[in-house]
Image: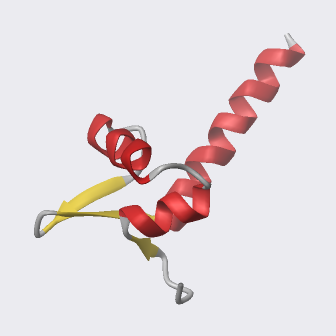
Amino acid sequence: MADTDIMTIEQAAEYLQLNKQTVARMARRGDLPAVKVGGTWRISKSLLMARFEAKEDAERKEVQR
């Protein structure tokens, strides 16, 4: 995969080590920072990482309570 910020469902699935159908379902539900362009989902790698980091921070704060 080229070093680009935009990934396809297949590239995101490989990156996240998840099944393609799982990633597609997460995109449809809005669980991933994805947009549909010409009938194909595109996922921003930098926004994906920011979302994971925010979730990790929230979980860390919850554990500290």
Quadrant in the picture for residue 30: top left
Quadrant in the picture for residue 56: top right
Q: Can the viewer see residue 43?
A: no
Residue ranking furthest to the bottom = 2
In percent of the image, x 56 and y 46: which residue is there?
51
Closest to the observer, 18 or 57? 18
Residue ranking furthest to the right = 64
28 w.r.t. 50: above or below: above
In percent of the image, x 41 and y 74: which residue is there?
6
In percent of the image, x 55 and y 50: which residue is there?
18
34 w.r.t. 25: above or below: below
Residue ranking furthest to the left = 38
Viewed as shown, does residue 32 lie left or right of 1? Answer: left
Quadrant in the picture for residue 63: top right
Viewed as shown, does residue 5 lie left or right of 29? Answer: right
Viewed as shown, does residue 41 lie left or right of 44? Answer: left
> In the image, residue 25 lies at what x, y percent?
33, 40
Closest to the observer, 14 or 46? 14
> In the image, residue 15 lies at what x, y percent?
59, 64
Question: How is the protein colored in the picture?
Answer: secondary structure
Q: How many marks?
A: 0
Q: Can the viewer see residue 16?
A: yes
In percent of the image, x 88 and y 17: which residue is there?
64
Quadrant the C terminus occupies? top right
51 w.r.t. 39: above or below: above
Viewed as shown, does residue 50 lie left or right of 44? Answer: right
> In the image, residue 55 lies at what x, y percent?
64, 35
Closest to the observer, 65 or 38? 38
